[in-house]
Image (spheres, rainbow, N blue to C red):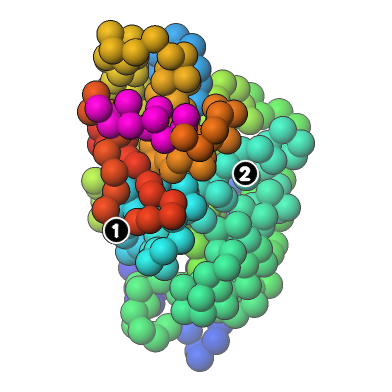
């Protein structure tokens, strides 16, 4: 790591680590902030949050949008780390189609599992070491060696890590060593759970916490994904959003290099204002994109229900249509369990949705066959 780029404005310290290198330890939160410079982007981001909350409150069934947004977040957040799969492959594996499932797809499904587990834990825990470590454990669970399975899932790092470069000397950034990592995470946990959490607006607080977590880089692998999961968790804990519907990775992926550079500039030059403004812009973009997804889903649901009612009188078809927005890939056994009907009746219901263009058979699968609601998969992309 080139330590010459750290100037006197850097909000942290360089300390010795392995192989004669220096590592960066960030200062405790919060820093001194220029709130006046944040006024306009903060107002726009808050307006976006208000619009998103209002749109979500109109939904008859919240699961119509929560699961598609979580699936979209898993795909985009994983893509930022070089793990790629398709929405079809993810939905197939989620539906139980283990045949020929790629490791990348399993890794992305782990993200969905980690995210939903973390949201559920929020009912009983604050944002704390246990929640963060359990989220990480779910993220890397069952992965092969070389894909995170050997990186101590659920445990903070025991060895010095670095970002960029094959060696620590060639690294772009060297986060804190293991002992300092634990101390920094203790301080971050204390900051998140400080006595008066109203002293900093949640949008700005999330920008601070996300930078701090990514800079500490507490795990051997999976730091970016866990750090992005923490953003909606913090919003939930502060009551900024009522449901888990804020997922920023798509907007961050679109500006990935700037995202990395803005955080790096905080560490090297103390440019907190630039980073927070960037984060607030990401929040605004995320809200706009999420509202668009919600509108597409509502429109598609209405269209599907009208199409079904114009051709059939069975309520089971409407139940299955609504279910497809949560799980857009189904099999006859799954529909049989969902509706509590015979296998023949389940297959007939699927055939009816095939007939009106809502489901289509996925090739190369048998016993069971799988059927995709491809328009739903595309609408949440």
Looking at the picture, tell me which residue is in the foreground, 48 or 312: 312
Residue 199 locus on image (x, y percent): 62, 27
Per the model, the C-alpha gap separating discs 1 and 2 is: 35 Å
Q: Are marks 1 and 2 in contact (CB under 8 Å)?
A: no
Residue 352 sits inside the magenta stretch: yes
Q: What residue span does the magenta drawing correspond to?
A: 345-355
Looking at the picture, tell me which residue is in the foreground, 322 or 203: 322
The quarter of the image holding the N terminus is: bottom left
Question: Which of marks 2 and 1 precedes in the sequence?
Answer: 2
Residue 324 locus on image (x, y percent): 41, 31
Q: Residue at x 43, y 14 (%)?
A: 314
Q: Residues within 10 Å of mark 2 (few under 14, many from 20)?
A: many
- Give the residue pinned by disc 1: 364
Q: Could one spot residue 321 in this view of the protein?
A: yes
Q: In this view, which residue lies farthest toward the bottom?
A: 19
64 on left or right of 40? right
Q: Could one spot residue 6 in this view of the protein?
A: no
- Give the residue pinned by disc 2: 118
Residue 227 locus on image (x, y percent): 51, 51
Q: In this view, which residue lies farthest toward the front?
A: 344
Q: Residue at x 41, y 64 (%)?
A: 99
Residue 360 sits inside the magenta stretch: no
| Mark number, residue 143 | none
Is label 2 in a helix, a strand or a loop?
A: helix
Q: Residues within 10 Å of mark 1 (few under 14, many from 20)?
A: few
Is label 1 in a helix, a strand or a loop?
A: loop
The quarter of the image holding the C terminus is: top left
Q: On screen, 230 above or below 145?
A: above
């Amino acid at each position: 790591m080139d330590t010459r780029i750290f100037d006197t404005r850097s909000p942290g310290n360089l300390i010795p680590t392995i192989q004669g290198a220096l590592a960066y330890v960030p200062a405790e939160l919060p820093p001194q902030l220029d709130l006046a410079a944040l006024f306009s982007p903060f107002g726009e981001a808050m307006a976006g949050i208000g619009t998103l909350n209002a749109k979500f409150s109109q939904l008859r069934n919240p699961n119509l949008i929560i699961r598609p947004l979580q699936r979209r977040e898993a795909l985009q957040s994983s893509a930022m780390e070089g793990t790629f799969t398709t929405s079809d492959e993810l939905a197939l594996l989620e539906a139980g189609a283990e045949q020929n499932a790629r490791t990348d797809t399993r890794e992305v499904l782990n993200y969905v599992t980690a995210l939903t587990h973390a949201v559920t834990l929020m009912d009983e825990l604050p944002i704390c070491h246990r929640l963060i470590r359990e989220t990480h454990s779910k993220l890397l669970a069952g992965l092969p060696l070389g894909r995170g399975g050997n990186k101590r899932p659920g445990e903070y790092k025991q060895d010095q890590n670095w970002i960029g470069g094959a060696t620590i000397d060639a690294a772009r950034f060297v986060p804190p060593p293991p002992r300092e990592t634990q101390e920094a995470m203790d301080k971050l946990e204390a900051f998140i759970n400080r006595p008066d959490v109203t002293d900093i607006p949640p949008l700005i607080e999330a920008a601070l916490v996300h930078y701090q977590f990514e800079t500490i880089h507490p795990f051997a692998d999976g730091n970016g994904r866990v750090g992005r999961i923490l953003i909606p968790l913090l919003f939930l804990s502060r009551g900024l959003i009522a449901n888990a519907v804020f997922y920023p990775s798509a907007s961050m992926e679109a500006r990935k290099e700037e995202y990395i550079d803005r955080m790096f500039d905080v560490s090297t030059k103390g440019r907190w204002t630039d980073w927070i403004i960037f984060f607030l812009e990401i929040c605004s973009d995320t809200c706009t994109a999420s509202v668009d997804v919600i509108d597409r889903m509502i429109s598609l649901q209405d269209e599907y229900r009208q199409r079904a009612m114009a051709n059939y009188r069975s309520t089971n078809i409407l139940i299955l249509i609504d279910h497809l927005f949560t799980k857009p890939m189904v099999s006859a056994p799954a529909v049989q369990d969902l509706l509590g009907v015979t296998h023949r009746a389940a297959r007939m219901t699927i055939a009816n949705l095939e007939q009106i263009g809502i489901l289509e058979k996925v090739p190369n699968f048998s016993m069971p066959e799988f059927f995709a609601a491809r328009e739903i998969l595309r609408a949440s992309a």
